[in-house]
Amino acid sequence: MAVEHHAERRHDDPPHRDRLGDERVDHRFKALPPDAEGLTVAALAAERRSLFTGGFTTPVLALSAESVEHNLALLETYAERHGLAFAPHGKTSMSPQLFDRQVARGAWGITAAVPHQARVYRAFGVRRIFLANELVDAAALRWLAAELDRDPGFRFLCYVDSVRGVELMDEALRDAGATRPVDVVVELGAGEGARTGARTEADCAAVADAVAAVTTLRLAGVAGYEGEVPSPDTDRVGAYLRRLTALAARFDGEGRFGGADGSAGPGGPEEIVISAGGSAWFDTVAEVFGEIPALSRPVLKLLRSGAYVSHDDGHYRRVTPFNRVPEEGSLQPAFRLWAQVVSRPSPGQAFVNAGKRDAPYDIDLPEPQAVRDARTGEIRPATGITVTGLSDQHGWLATEPGADLEVGDWVGMGLSHPCTTFDKWQLIPLVEADGTVTDFIRTFF
């Protein structure tokens, strides 16, 4: 990705990120050592305790330090190789520490879905936000207008997909006395039955006309989400993305991004934004965006994949584009949930003390991968052990004949769906391969 699109920080950035380490360890945070009560998070991290013998209680979620670093580096390299800017979706982790690392690895900015997320981003100094939704909440628009007025260096973009949405945005921004127009991108829906987005090019043109009729908004580009293409495959996803890029070219030819001569003014954007890219089809996004012809001004080809930072051991392991392009590399699952066997009522059944409050279950159940022997501390493969269900605070395990498991053992489980893993934990140990805890990742859901 081009260097000029990297996010920058002001000297007067909010100090919140520096205070994360000053939070006190107490009852608010699951699994942290009881004897660490009253320590700051930074002080606890500096002790470099072992996840297994350092007083952590179960269940405890661990994030692999090595895998996170690998994944951050891989997507940075991938985006650069394909000429893409990158605004990873922050709703996956809602972690300012990870946002900082993503920006340090070349991210243009961070994508949000709802106003709360954008407020968290701003509290921690994110300079560029892409809101992948139509923003019609009047209170949120008042906040946005004030934030844009307060900080000339803050850049914000969001979807528009309806004439009514444009009317609501304009009314709220005018009532707020906004002095800077809000940059918007018209969202092209991915087909009938898909999620949001104007369904046809004609609908998109009507939305663009509505934007042009007001002074509070400025048309900056087009966007969409290819993950909602019905019955997706490479051909269908590619066809949708080519509709999206053709729409951008058409709008540009019609002078919708500025003067009729294609110039940036008066009031036109310096670049045309074309954005797509979830975590399942970014290879097709890269291919199609690589075909975009020269337009009247530079094009910001903005990828928004977010799940890559932790990857997973289920859904994204199956659907990652790197399965189709293995020569480009591979992501590493970074989560492991450790729970303790608290009941072994029969030879074929066991229960651990982690359930729906601790592990995601909206796509796949956890996958037992390792057992830490309570007697010896030895870690062995979780052979013959399967999670069959989750209660609120229990995991149901089926054990095959000969499965080596007893009360007190820890079971390490891979998880599926990062977005519903992060949101269950406010403070997550970052753990090196030998079990040493080096930091704690704070989330804000």
Image: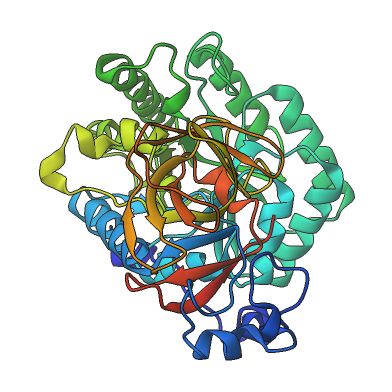
Q: Residue at x 38, y 47 (%)?
A: 404
**Spot occupied by residue 157 in the image (x, y as percentages of width and height):** 58, 48
Q: Number of marks in the image?
A: 0
Nearest the camera: 341 or 141? 341
Vertical side of 22 occupied by 125: above or below: above
Q: Is residue 431 visible?
A: yes
Q: Residue furthest top?
A: 192
**Spot occupied by residue 220 in the image (x, y as percentages of width and height):** 51, 43
Q: Residue furthest right?
A: 175
Instruction: Look at the image and tell me in which quarter the N terminus lies.
Output: bottom left
Q: Is residue 122 left or right of residue 386?
A: right
Nearest the camera: 193 or 287? 193
**Spot occupied by residue 35 in the image (x, y as percentages of width and height):** 68, 84
Q: Is residue 180 visible?
A: no
Q: Residue at x 28, y 62 (%)?
A: 70
Vertical side of 237 occupied by 222: above or below: below
